[in-house]
Structure formats: structure tokens, C-alpha cells
């Protein structure tokens, strides 16, 4: 028995097959959320935003493009179990299965869509019995890390915001009346204002990081807000 909602990413550009398989899955499970896209770029964006339990990918168009997509997908989110749909088994696909640990290959015969719910159930139980394996532990640790980063950033923002706004307000007031002051002073005040704005911008980015990127510095490891995946309103 499956006790939680199953979240599935379905990459399929054949609308008929997409609807056929979606209907079969929904008829087999009480609680399932299926996200369908026919574009690889969109699929890669979606795995950054959502925690999918598995993916279903149709490999029927350009073989090179599809396999390149699987390589990118696995490099982005290695723990995601995959069901791959193909018209016929090929030696190149067998090698890909071995290389990327793809769970199942389904040959698209006249009744292939009937096999999908059984495979989903099989993969689900296999993977959720292994929640303590290193891949899954790593996944949840990263999720906890991003939440901790957000909490710390929000706390810092709360504590720093009042003095920071005071600094910005005072510098703006001086710069608005720059004719009253020495040009060298105005230049230094401008630098202070820009630094204060940078602090505010960095704190704001840190508070909405979904996937932190770490960089090595002389001072040690630091989070890189520019390279970290930022969750924004337009991303959702």
C-alpha cells in the first residue's frame, strides 16, 4: 500500500501517449501528481523546483538528444528513478541503462501503457525501502541545509535591516544634497551606499536559496548566492 502522494515527472511529446499513460496511472493510484512536459529544458527546470519520486521518459525521437537529456537529468538529480519508453531495444540503450542505473526500459507494444502502473509501484517500494541509502540521505540533507540557510539569512536580515536602512537613508540624504559637501566625501558616501545595497541584495538572495552552491575561498568554504539556485515567484 502506498501511503503518500506519488509525484511523477513525465517527459512525452506525443500527446496521445501522454493522455493514455496519465489516465492509466491515475486509475491505478488514489494519490498521484503527474507533471507532463514535451520539452527537455522545461523538465530540467522542473526537477530543480519539485521533489519528484520518479520520472517517465519517452526515448522515441532523436536518440542523441534524448540520451543527452538523461545525462543532464542524472547529473542534476542522481537519485531520481527512471522508466524509459522505447520503440525497440537497442544496444546503445542497454549501455545507458548500465551507466545511469535506469530502473526500467519499456518497449512500446500494443499494450505497453498497462505495464506502467505496475512498474511505478515496484520502483516506489524498492526505493522507499532504501530511504537510508547514501543517495536519499544526501537528498534530504541538502533539503535541510537549504532550509537552515534560509532561516539564518532571514534572522540576519531581521537583525541587520534596521541599521542597514538607517545607513541607506543617511547616505541617500547626503547624496541628494551633494552640492553642500566635499566631492571626495560624496564619493566615499556613494561607496558606502553601494556596499549597503549589496548587503541587502545578498541577504535577500540567501533567504530564498533552494539549492546552495559552495565555493572555496581563502577564508574557507562559502555559499555563492550568484551560482546557487534561487527560488523566485516567476520560477514556480
Image (tube, rainbow, N blue to C red):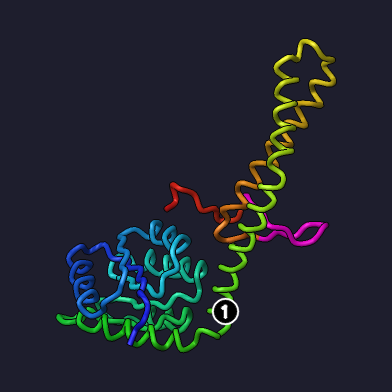
Image quadrant in which you'd find residue 25: bottom left
Q: Residue at x 42, y 88 (%)?
A: 126
Please name the residue shown 71% across and 31% down the image. Answer: 168
Residue 145, x across and y down, in percent: 62, 66
Vertical placement of residue 3 versus 194, above or below: below
133 or 162: nearer the viewer: 162
Which quadrant of the view contains residue 118? bottom left
Main SS of the magenta part reads strand
The tally of labels here is: 1
Q: Which residue is mark 1?
A: 137
Where residue 65 appears, as percent x and y from the top left, is 38, 64
Residue 201 in the image: above or below residue 127: above
Quadrant in which the N terminus appears: bottom left
Q: Position of residue 20 (x, y in %)?
A: 18, 71
Q: Is residue 132 left or right of residue 198?
A: left
Q: Is residue 218 magenta?
A: yes
> Is residue 185 on the magenta stretch?
no
| SS type, badge 1 | helix
Task: Work out which residue is located at the far top of the displayed protein and give it.
Answer: 179
Furthest-left residue in this view: 110
Magenta stretch: give its range.
214-226
| Image x and y of residue 44, in percent | 43, 61
Q: Is residue 32 left or right of residue 24?
A: right
Residue at (69%, 51%) from the top-left corner? 156
Amino acid at each position: 500500500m502506498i501511503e503518500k502522494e506519488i509525484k511523477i515527472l513525465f517527459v512525452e511529446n506525443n500527446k496521445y501517449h501522454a493522455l493514455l499513460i496519465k489516465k492509466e496511472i491515475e486509475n491505478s493510484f488514489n494519490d498521484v501528481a503527474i507533471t507532463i512536459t514535451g520539452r527537455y529544458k522545461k523538465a530540467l527546470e522542473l526537477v530543480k523546483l519539485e521533489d519528484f519520486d520518479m520520472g517517465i521518459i519517452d526515448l522515441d525521437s532523436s536518440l542523441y538528444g534524448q540520451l543527452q537529456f538523461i545525462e543532464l537529468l542524472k547529473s542534476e538529480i542522481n537519485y531520481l528513478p527512471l522508466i524509459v519508453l522505447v520503440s525497440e531495444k537497442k544496444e546503445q540503450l542497454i549501455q545507458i541503462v548500465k551507466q545511469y542505473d535506469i530502473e526500467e526500459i519499456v518497449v512500446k507494444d500494443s499494450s505497453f501503457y498497462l505495464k506502467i502502473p505496475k512498474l511505478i509501484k515496484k520502483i516506489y517500494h524498492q526505493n522507499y525501502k532504501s530511504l537510508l541509502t547514501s543517495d536519499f540521505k544526501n537528498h534530504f540533507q541538502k533539503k535541510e541545509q537549504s532550509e537552515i540557510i534560509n532561516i539564518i539569512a532571514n534572522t540576519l536580515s531581521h537583525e541587520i535591516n534596521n541599521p542597514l536602512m538607517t545607513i541607506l537613508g543617511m547616505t541617500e540624504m547626503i547624496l541628494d544634497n551633494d552640492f553642500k559637501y566635499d566631492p571626495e566625501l560624496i564619493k566615499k558616501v556613494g561607496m558606502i551606499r553601494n556596499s549597503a545595497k549589496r548587503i541587502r541584495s545578498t541577504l535577500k538572495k540567501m533567504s530564498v536559496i533552494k539549492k546552495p552552491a559552495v565555493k572555496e575561498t581563502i577564508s574557507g568554504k562559502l555559499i555563492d548566492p550568484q551560482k546557487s539556485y534561487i527560488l523566485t515567484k516567476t520560477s514556480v
